[in-house]
Image (cartoon, rainbow, N blue to C red):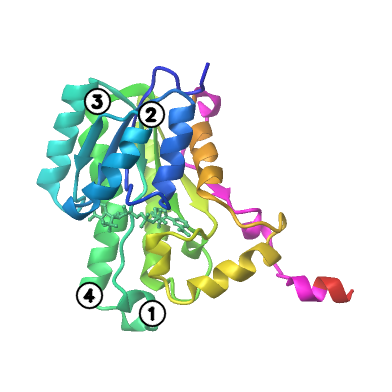
Amino acid sequence: MGLLEGKNALIFGLANDKSIAWGITQAFHREGANLGISYAGEMLERRVRPLAEKVGCEWVEECDVSKDDQITAVAEKAAQHFGKIDVLVHSIAFAGRDELSKPYYQTSREGFRNALDISVYSFVALTNAFHSILNPGASVMCLTYYGSVKVAPHYNVMGVAKAALESSTRYLAYDLGPEKIRVNAISAGPIRTLAAAGVGGFRDMYKHFADMSPLRENITIDDVGNAAVFLASNMSSRITGEVLYVDSGFNTMGVQLGAKEEKSE
Ligand code: NAP
């Protein structure tokens, strides 16, 4: 029997088969979850529907999380279709190209507002909208990155947004704890996705990541999917407010030795 058998799981942020949300969707499917998928806009529907079919998902709904009315509508549709929800995944982020390439101090007010609105506030808003249909023991989660705690060149306002997202995770965990609803974040190492392609210098960083991390391996969307299964399942029933790193151990390094230095010893 799968770890998520009998659980209704909604995943927000599927864009294509490279998305972290797709790794999570497939892992949830393998573990027997009853799935619902939400995507950002009409443009994506063409790519998302065939993926949803692959995992037998019938509930596929559009939701632009920068719009309160769309969030309210999607929560109502979920309530009609599923009744109650056990797992809610937020795998959404956005920052403008300028914000991810120019120096951080040149961030515009509008760019800052947009990044924080879509990448952070939406997590709070979704949690609020779904609160009344979350089962006791439900698991809510979001995706973050190490650029929240240390400088990752070019990550800029997104690093600031991820810091706010991780902090939101803790405050939401506190609020919902008495109802036995858990809220956690997965901090994933770099993965080649649409969102990552927008970050200046990502390719170089990705290339060297494996050399610099203890496990000497890049991570995949399947690795994140498996960690998400753990957080979604009853196996993690006393874990809340946490940031779980799925990054081959990269975040534990204080001094980074590249592959070259190691060979010359
Ligand atoms: P992705 O496939 O591009 O997923 C990002 C998703 O956010 C897309 O589906 C995107 O839709 C959606 N989105 C953007 N604006 C939205 C809005 N207003 N309403 C609803 N959805 C919106 O990239 P990903 O790498 O899998 O990103 C998923 C999450 O993982 C993000 O939180 C990201 O920061 C995080 N993460 C990624 C990495 C990495 O290296 N890839 C590492 C750590 C954490 P559109 O395509 O239509 O904009």
The answer to whether the beta carbon of the residue marked 1 is less than 8 Å from any atom of ligand 1 is no
Q: Which residue is mark 2?
A: 181
Check contact, mark 4 vs mark 1: CB within 8 A: no
Tell me residue 212's x, y (percent): 68, 66
Residue 84 sits above or below residue 129 on the image: above
Which mark is nearer the camera, 3 or 1?
A: 1
Q: Quadrant of ligand 1?
A: bottom left
Asked if residue 48 lies left or right of residue 19, the reply is left
Q: Which mark is residue 5?
A: none
Residue 4 sits above or below residue 173 on the image: above
Q: Which residue is mark 4?
A: 109
Asked if residue 221 lies left or right of residue 15, the reply is right
CA distance separating discs 3 and 2: 11 Å
Which is nearer the N-term, disc 4 or disc 1? 1
CA distance separating discs 4 and 1: 16 Å
The residue range painted magenta reads 234-261
Which mark is nearer the camera, 4 or 1?
A: 1
